[in-house]
Amino acid sequence: MAKFVLPSAWLLIWGVAGCDASLDAYVPPKGGDTDATDAPTDTVVDGDDDDDTTSSSTTETTETTEPVDIDLDGVTPWYGTVDQEVTLFGGPFPADVDVQFGGESAVVLDNQGDRLTLAVPDLGDDAVVEITATAATGSSPAPLDFQYFEDGTGKYGALGTVDWYDYRGGYWDAATVDTGYAQVMLSVPTVNSYAQVSFAGVRDTCERDWSLGVTTYIYDPGVGSITLRDGANQLVLPSVVDQPYIYYGTDLQVQPGNTYDLSPITANPLWPDFGVPQISGTVPSAMVVTSPNIDNGSFPTTPSSITVNWAGPYDGDAVLVRMQRMRWDGNTFQPLERVSCWLTDDGSHIVPASSWAAWDTSNDYVYMAVGRAYQPQNVILPHNNAQSDVMGVYWSIGFLDAN
């Protein structure tokens, strides 16, 4: 059979959120006042050194203390989750001031009179809440908005991959070249890793046409693209047209050995403009697959039970496998079922014959990608305490002939 170019649509199917994972947009209520420059509006109204009003007569003296406004001029950052430290500007803030976020009192960590350092209380779910301040001498005349995010401690808040695709063997068309891909999704805190969402529910298993069966909600930052960087190496990921909360880039110059930062998302003033250093795991170096021998000059043959062996070092956080069974109809390869695996990096796994719904030895072929994956090293997202699970992956890609 002549050399060929695999249809690019197949890569897009796999690239955008992996398999048939159930992903849905989640647009949180947003808001906030970032203006911390307003001057206090309290004035002295009775000519003495305090903020009271005193009236007197020659026969008796009656002192009446009017409430003193506690101005709230700004809060930074204007978003966050439980226990995050924020600074509230304004005042004057007396020693007994009670600052509440959505009706819950915050712990005052430091009081400088015109600014407070506070720990955000636990408010549960995402919501825009009001910040208010009260004391024995007065209260805030107007509240501030604050964007509260659900606490993601111990969960994942960013999913995706930064991939390098290495086409092995001598059977590819000259137009098929090694290339990079990347996708990033900022998720509502979830217990499910990217491998579980996109490959298999349990480690060391393979699944046909995998779907997790639960909905993973993804924030929509409301911008047309996001940017990943490693020094001068920049990866621009546009939003997907029909899923604008997923950011996916093709034909990227991903560099094995690099770890990528998320640049601040500044195009939407209602989305927090945080950046995330090293949001991705390091993209590994070459992944050598020894069986099936995809480095052959022609398609290696394989039975329906596929034994996959790969070389060390066995230091990946996972090995991921993507396979697409395709049928040659005399003119083109028609894509059929997909099988995906989430494996331990121990050098070997048998993909059972039962993974396939059918197997035609005369007309079937399998596009196979085996990737070593590194996860980020305990990267905590600044808005909700969740971890990043944007994996760096090096894929070795071959094409198998059904035997």
Image (tube, helix red, strand yellow):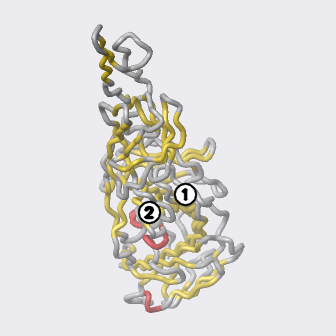
Q: Do we see residue 147 in this rendering?
A: yes
Provide the secondary structure element on which disc 1 rests. Answer: strand
Q: Nearer the viewer, residue 337 or 91?
A: 91
Task: State the residue at coordinates (59%, 83%).
Answer: 308
Q: Residue at x 37, y 31 (%)?
A: 137
Mark closer to the observer (2, 1): 2
Q: Residues within 10 Å of mark 2 (few under 14, many from 20)?
A: some
Q: Is residue 232 left or right of residue 249?
A: right
Q: Which residue is located at x 41 percent, y 62 percent?
A: 16
Q: Is residue 344 above or below residue 10?
A: below
Kindly give the residue lying farthest to the top in the view shown. Answer: 58
Residue 79 lies, in percent from the top left, at 42, 44
Find residue 61 and report its image quarter. Answer: top left
Which residue is identified by label 2? 15
As shown in the figure, which amino acid type bears the numbered disc 2? Gly
236 or 177, nearer to the observer = 236
Residue on which the image places disc 1:
179
